[in-house]
Amino acid sequence: MRNKIIPIFIPHEGCPHDCSFCNQKKISGSVKVPGEEEIQNTIQMYVDSNDESSKFTIAYYGGSFTAIEEEKQMALLQLAKTNMENGKIHGIRVSTRPDYLNEENVRLLKSYSVEHVEIGIQSTDPVVLSLANRHYDLDGIKEAVQNLKKSEINWGFQIMVGLPGDNRRKLLKTTFDLIHLKPSTLRIYPCLVIKDTQLEQFYYEGSYKPLPLQEAVDLVKIPFIAFTEKEIPIIRTGLHASKSLGESGNVIAGPNHPSFGEIVVSSIIFDMICGYLDAQEFSGNITIGCSLKMRSKVSGNKNFVLCKLKDRYGVDILIQSDDSLENMISIKSIHGDVKLSLGNYYKETVKEYESEYNISR
């Protein structure tokens, strides 16, 4: 049975901070906080559309949930818990900041059967956090995780690549800092310049330059590969393309692409193939075999992987579906047939990241 999320966006509700990059109303598409009746109607809509092949988890996204006044938190959590007791939903999750996960905050969540908390970390570097107007540190993140662990509530992290003051070395540190805290999920967002944010002002002043798309993809590959190698699910790569976010002028600048997550995976596959071909005295055309579900990722968005391989090696490439290849691809040429494992590639790449990080410290 599949688990589906019922997302309830609560823009800026409870958040006393204005992070430099954030305008939740533009990102989520929500302008006002939904009332309890509206939330109940949303839950019922999901339940009525179910074909009994799914179960549902309600997720309060958007604002810093645990910073909401306690009475409002209790009302929203009680609504969710009542629906769980009635069998309409099967889980409750919220998103918040690490500096609003003290013991009292977590006890309240536990009393209403919250099972998972997504923590907006963004970075563990103090300079990056300060420039983003996020006033906590790695010790505060560790304390929040420890409080959740003691209450037996799962946690996931959200990180952002390309914030002011960030760089590859700091991203490597953030990646390994957070892997050691053993989250159950991860979301990775490239930093975008959203309308009506402080970052928009920095951009027009010339003090902030957003990442180009390819550079953002190359950086996002670091946490994507490292967390995947540790079998920590990446549940989102890139912002969700809400109607509001897509409206003209809301994204001022930055690496925004509707297929950002798939481009990241395809770029990893491209790197793996090149790593093999570069080590050969290669000539002649090749056939790449992969499972049907991997085919679009191997070819890449608008066939960019195939085009780049052709340009780099001057060869024609054919893709064949082979469902016996799970998390592997095969390369056939006049030189023979080889199978490449994504899992092995991740392990070797993480070793390289660890070496790079240790050298740069």
Image: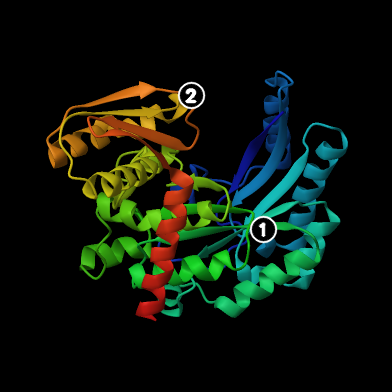
- Asked whether residue 20 appears in the rendered view, the answer is no
To which residue does mark 2 refer? 323
Q: Residues within 10 Å of mark 2 (few under 14, many from 20)?
A: some
Which residue, given by chain and number where applicable, does mark 1 sit on?
A: 155
- Measured as percent of width and height from the top left, residue 200 is found at 31, 60
Q: Please name the amino acid that badge 1 sits on.
A: Trp
**Measuring 73% from the left and 34% from the top, which residue is drawn there?**
40
Secondary structure category for the residue under label 1: strand
Picture layout, residue 41 above or below residue 8:
above
Could you say where residue 202 lies in the image, as x and y percent from the top left? Answer: 28, 67
Is 3 in front, or is 316? 316
Instruction: State whether residue 102 is above or below residue 291.
Output: below
Occupied quadrant, residue 179: bottom right
Query: Does residue 61 appear in this view?
Result: yes
- The span from disc 1 to disc 2 (Cα, nearest Å) is 34 Å
| 284 sits left or right of 267 in the view | left
Asked if residue 329 lies left or right of residue 53, the reply is left
Pick whichever, 126 or 353, lies toward us.
353
